[in-house]
Amino acid sequence: METSQPDTSPRPQQNRKMAELQKHLEDGLNEFKAEVTEQPLLYLAFAFIAGFISWTFPIRLIFSAMTRLVSFLLGPAILLIGILKITELFSARLGPERNISLKSSQKS
């Protein structure tokens, strides 16, 4: 007869935290929606000013250049990480064989 073991995984705590976070975000979103419906012209002005600033100042060019630089450097970085992982994999497989060959060469 099998006995069931108690579930000691952290899943219930994670689910509770996620539910609390989701409730907090929904409350914040509902509060923001209420503010926007109370003062739509104020938020329309905020959006217009933010769009105007982002269009006239060169910040969009800076973000564009940063995005291009990151995407340009991300390819070689991912390739380098892949090469390192492959060398780790092969060194883990050849590890015991290397130790045997080193010990036999040290004995002679």
Image (cartoon, grey):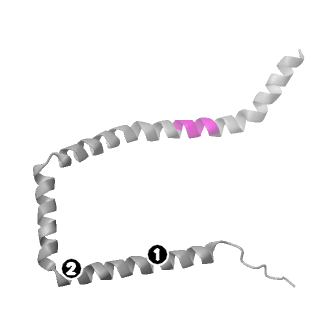
Residue at the image position 16 percent from the left and 61 percent from the top: 50
- Depth check: give the residue in front, 60 or 43: 43
Residue 54 image label: none
Quadrant that contains the C terminus: top right
Amino acid, disc 2:
Val
Front of the two marks 1 and 2 = 2
Question: As drawn, is 19 to the left or to the right of 25?
Answer: right
Residue at the image position 75 percent from the left and 79 percent from the top: 6
Estimate the spatial distance between the alpha carbons at disc 1 and disc 2, rounded to whole Å.
22 Å
Question: As drawn, is 75 to the left or to the right of 48?
Answer: right
Q: Position of residue 93 (x, y in %)?
A: 70, 38
| Disc 2 element | helix
The stretch of residues the image draws in magenta is 83-88
Tell me which corner region of the image, top left, top right, bottom left or bottom right, holds residue 41.
bottom left
Of the residues under marks 1 and 2, which one precedes in the sequence? 1
| Residue 108 drawn above or below residue 67 | above
| Disc 1 element | helix
Amino acid, disc 1:
Leu
Tell me which corner region of the image, top left, top right, bottom left or bottom right, holds residue 35.
bottom left
How many residues crowd mark 2 within 10 Å: few (<14), some (14–19), many (20+)?
Answer: some
Q: Is residue 35 within the magenta segment?
A: no
The residue tagged 2 is 36
The residue tagged 1 is 21
- Depth check: give the residue in front, 88 or 17: 17
